[in-house]
Image (spheres, rainbow, N blue to C red):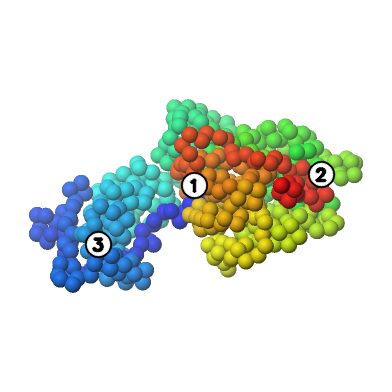
C-alpha cells in the first residue's frame, strides 16, 4: 500500500520541485555592506538575517496591473518555469500582501531556483514564521541555502533545527547535493545517520541502529501518552534493554524485537514496511492465506500448489493456527484489532519471521496440516521461494498465482472480479444498481480519479439508477488529497445521496487514505455501511516517511501526522457497519457475497 507513501508524499514540498527564480535589476536585500548579513568572506549570523521587499516600480504607476492580475502572472510564470519572471511577480505579490504564507513560500522557491540563495533565506524564514507547509521543510531549505553559500555553521544549525522540529525525509538529507559541503562534518554525519560503522562490533552496530530508531521516534512520532500507547520513558527503557541483550540475540530475533517495539507505539503505519533486505528474508511460502470466520484457509497459490486451494490450515510447523496468530499478534502494529486479521495471513507466509518467533525450525520449508473441502485431513511440505517477498510484510501476492475463486464453477461475485484495478464500475440493469469498486485512493495512469468520478456521475445522471454501491473492502489507502472530487459529487447528487440509495461496503483492509475517505462519507453523506469494521480509526496517526537503519538495513516507518477526519470527540476504534456481514468461507466457496446480497435486499 501506499499508502502505503497512507503514508501522503504529495503533501511534502521538496525544494527540487519548486517553481520560481528571481534575477531582476532590483535588489531585495539592501546592498550596503553593514546591512547585508552574507558575504563570501564572513560567516553570516542566521538569527539576524532579514530583508525588505520593494514593489516593482510599475506597480506604483497609474494603470499598473491589479493585485489579482499580478498574482495570476506569478502563478502562470511559475507553471511555465519562467523562473526569472515568476520571482519578479512574487516579489510584487508579497510586497502587497505580506501575510500569506503560501505567497512567501512561492517567492522563496523562485529565488532558490534562480540560485539567489542569500535572498531566498529570509523569504523561507518568513514562510516558516507564517506556517507554510511543513515547518521543518522551510528550516531544511534554509540549511541548504546556507550550505550552498559555504556558510557551514549556519547550515548545520538550521539543519539541526529542521530535525528538531520533525524533518521527514532522512534519505534526502543523506543524499542531497545541496549539502555536499557538509558531507565530511562529524555533526552532519551523526545527524543524518551516516557515521562509519566499519570499526564497530556487531553489538555496537545494533545499538547504533536502536539509538537512531529511538531518536526518530522521539522527534517524529506523534505525542507520547496522547495517541501513542506507551510513554517516552517506557520506550527508552525498552530500547536500552534490547541493546543490552543484542549480544545474546540472533539478527532474526533482533528484527522481531524491533517489530515488538514498534507495535507498542500504537498505530498501524508505524513499523517495518518491508522485510530486511537480506537473502533469507526473501524466502516466503508460495501460498496466500485468508482468515475467515471459520478459520484460516488457502485462497491463492503458485500453480505448483494448486491442489492446496480451499484447504483449511489446522497447523503449521506443528503449531495450531490460533497459536500462530497469537504469536504474530506481538509484531503487528495496528490502529485497532481488525488490522491484525488483515496482516497476519500475509506474515504467515514468512518462514524467517516464524522461525525467529520459534514457530518453525527451517526457513526453507514448512509442514502444513490441512483439512480439504471434502473434510479429509492431510499433511504436506511446502517449500519457500523468493517470488514475492515484499508481500509478507504488506498485502499482495503475484498476479500469476491461481486463486481458489478461479477454480470454482460459475462466475465469481463482483467483489472478486477485478480487485487489482484502482477503480471501476458496472451497471446492474436488473436491479438498477451501479456497483463501483474503489480499490485504491490513487490515480490510474489512463484516467485520473477526478475524471473517473465525472464519468461515473454522468452515467448515474443519464440512466435509471436506484442505488449506488461503493465497495471499499479491498482499499488500503493512497492519497487522501485525491478524495474531495468524489466526496463533493456524492454530496451534491440528490439522485443517490439518500437513505437507502447509497451504500458503502467496508472491511478490515479499509485503511489509511481509504479510512479517511470512509470517514468523510460517514460525516457528509447519507451512506449506509455494510460489511465488517474498518482496519483503522476515524481519527488516527498516519503517513509513510520511511528510512533505513544503517546497520541492519531494516526499512522502518514512523508516522507523524494526526488525521482528524472525524469530530475531535470521536474515539471509536473503527467505523462499524450498520449491516454486519463478516467474511465466511462457506459464502466464499459458494461464490456468494453476503454484503452485496444485503444491499440488494435492502428496502
Which residue is at a point 37% across and 68% down the rendered structure image? 79
Numbered tag placed on residue 543 in the rendering: 1
Give x and y (percent) for residue 553. 52, 47
Which residue is at a point 11% across and 55% down the rendered structure image? 35
- Mark 3 and 2 residues: CB-CB less than 8 Å, in contact? no
Give x and y (percent) for residue 188. 34, 47
Where is 116 relative to 474, above or below? below
User: Observer-nearest residue: 136 or 248?
Assistant: 136
Which residue is tagged 2?
A: 586
Q: CA distance from mark 3 to mark 2?
A: 65 Å
Badge 3 element = helix
The label nearer to you, 2 versus 1, is 2
In primary-sequence order, the first of circles 3 and 1 is 3
Left or right for 362, reference 114: right
Q: How many marks?
A: 3
Which residue is tagged 3?
A: 93
Left or right for 457, reference 43: right
In primary-sequence order, the first of circles 3 and 2 is 3
Which residue is at a point 85% across and 56% down the rendered structure image? 409
Left or right for 73, reference 338: left
Which residue is at a point 30% across and 53% down the rendered structure image? 101
In primary-sequence order, the first of circles 2 and 1 is 1
Amino acid at each position: 500500500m501506499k499508502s502505503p507513501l497512507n503514508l501522503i508524499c504529495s503533501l511534502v514540498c521538496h525544494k527540487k520541485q519548486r517553481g520560481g527564480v528571481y534575477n531582476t535589476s532590483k535588489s531585495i536585500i539592501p546592498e550596503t555592506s553593514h546591512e547585508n548579513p552574507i558575504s563570501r568572506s564572513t560567516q553570516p549570523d542566521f538569527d539576524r538575517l532579514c530583508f525588505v521587499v520593494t514593489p516593482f516600480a510599475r506597480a506604483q504607476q497609474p494603470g499598473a496591473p491589479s493585485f489579482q492580475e499580478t498574482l495570476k502572472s506569478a502563478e502562470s510564470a511559475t507553471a511555465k518555469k519562467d523562473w526569472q519572471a515568476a520571482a519578479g511577480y512574487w516579489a510584487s505579490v508579497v510586497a502587497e500582501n505580506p501575510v500569506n504564507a503560501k505567497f512567501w513560500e512561492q517567492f522563496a522557491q523562485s529565488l532558490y531556483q534562480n540560485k539567489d540563495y542569500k535572498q531566498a533565506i529570509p523569504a523561507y524564514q518568513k514562510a516558516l514564521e507564517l506556517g507554510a507547509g511543513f515547518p521543518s521543510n522551510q528550516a531544511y531549505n534554509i540549511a541548504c541555502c546556507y550550505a550552498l553559500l559555504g556558510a557551514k555553521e549556519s547550515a548545520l544549525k538550521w539543519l539541526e533545527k529542521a530535525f528538531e522540529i520533525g524533518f521527514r525525509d532522512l534519505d534526502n538529507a543523506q543524499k542531497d547535493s545541496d549539502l555536499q559541503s557538509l558531507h565530511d562534518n562529524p555533526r552532519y554525519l551523526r545527524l543524518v545517520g551516516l557515521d562509519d560503522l566499519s570499526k564497530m562490533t556487531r553489538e555496537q552496530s545494533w545499538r547504533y541502529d536502536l539509538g537512531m530508531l529511538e531518536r526518530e521516534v522521539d522527534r517524529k512520532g506523534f505525542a507520547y501518552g496522547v495517541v501513542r500507547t506507551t510513554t517516552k520513558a517506557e520506550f527508552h527503557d525498552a530500547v536500552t534493554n534490547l541493546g543490552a541483550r543484542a549480544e545474546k540475540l540472533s539478527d532474526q530475533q533482533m528484527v522481531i524485537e524491533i517489530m515488538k517495539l514498534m507495535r507498542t507505539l500504537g498505530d498501524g503505519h508505524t513499523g517495518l514496511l518491508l522485510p530486511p533486505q537480506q537473502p533469507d528474508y526473501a524466502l516466503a511460502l508460495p501460498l496466500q492465506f485468508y482468515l475467515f470466520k471459520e478459520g484460516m484457509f488457502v485462497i491463492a497459490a503458485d500453480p505448483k500448489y494448486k491442489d492446496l486451494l480451499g484447504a483449511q490450515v489446522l497447523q503449521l510447523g506443528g503449531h495450531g493456527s490460533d497459536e500462530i496468530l497469537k504469536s504474530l499478534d506481538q509484531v503487528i502494529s495496528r490502529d485497532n484489532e481488525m488490522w491484525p486479521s488483515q496482516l497476519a495471513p500475509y506474515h504467515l507466509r514468512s518462514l524467517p519471521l516464524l522461525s525467529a518467533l520459534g514457530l518453525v525450525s527451517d526457513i526453507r520449508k514448512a509442514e502444513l496440516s490441512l483439512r480439504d473441502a471434502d473434510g479429509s485431513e492431510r499433511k504436506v511440505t511446502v517449500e519457500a521461494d523468493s517470488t514475492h517477498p515484499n508481500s509478507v510484510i504488506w498485502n499482495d501476492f503475484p498476479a500469476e498465482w491461481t486463486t481458489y475463486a478461479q477454480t470454482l464453477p460459475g462466475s465469481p461475485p463482483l467483489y472478486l472480479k477485478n480487485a487489482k484495478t484502482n477503480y471501476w464500475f458496472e451497471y446492474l440493469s436488473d436491479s438498477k444498481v451501479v456497483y463501483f469498486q474503489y480499490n485504491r485512493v490513487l490515480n490510474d495512469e489512463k484516467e485520473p480519479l477526478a475524471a473517473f468520478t465525472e464519468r461515473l456521475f454522468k452515467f448515474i445522471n443519464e440512466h435509471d439508477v436506484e442505488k449506488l454501491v461503493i465497495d471499499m473492502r479491498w482499499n488500503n489507502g493512497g492519497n487522501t488529497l485525491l478524495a474531495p472530487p468524489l466526496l463533493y459529487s456524492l454530496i451534491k447528487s440528490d439522485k443517490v445521496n439518500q437513505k437507502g440509495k447509497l451504500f458503502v461496503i467496508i472491511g478490515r483492509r479499509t485503511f489509511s487514505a481509504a479510512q479517511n475517505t470512509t470517514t468523510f462519507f460517514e460525516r457528509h453523506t447519507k451512506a449506509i455501511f455494510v460489511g465488517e469494521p474498518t482496519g483503522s480509526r476515524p481519527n488516527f496517526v498516519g503517513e509513510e516517511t520511511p528510512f533505513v537503519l544503517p546497520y541492519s538495513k531494516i526499512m522502518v516507518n514512523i508516522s507523524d501526522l494526526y488525521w482528524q477526519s472525524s469530530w475531535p470527540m470521536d474515539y471509536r476504534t473503527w467505523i462499524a457497519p450498520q449491516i454486519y456481514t463478516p467474511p465466511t468461507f462457506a459464502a466464499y466457496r459458494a461464490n456468494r457475497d453476503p454484503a452485496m446480497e444485503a444491499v440488494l435486499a435492502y428496502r
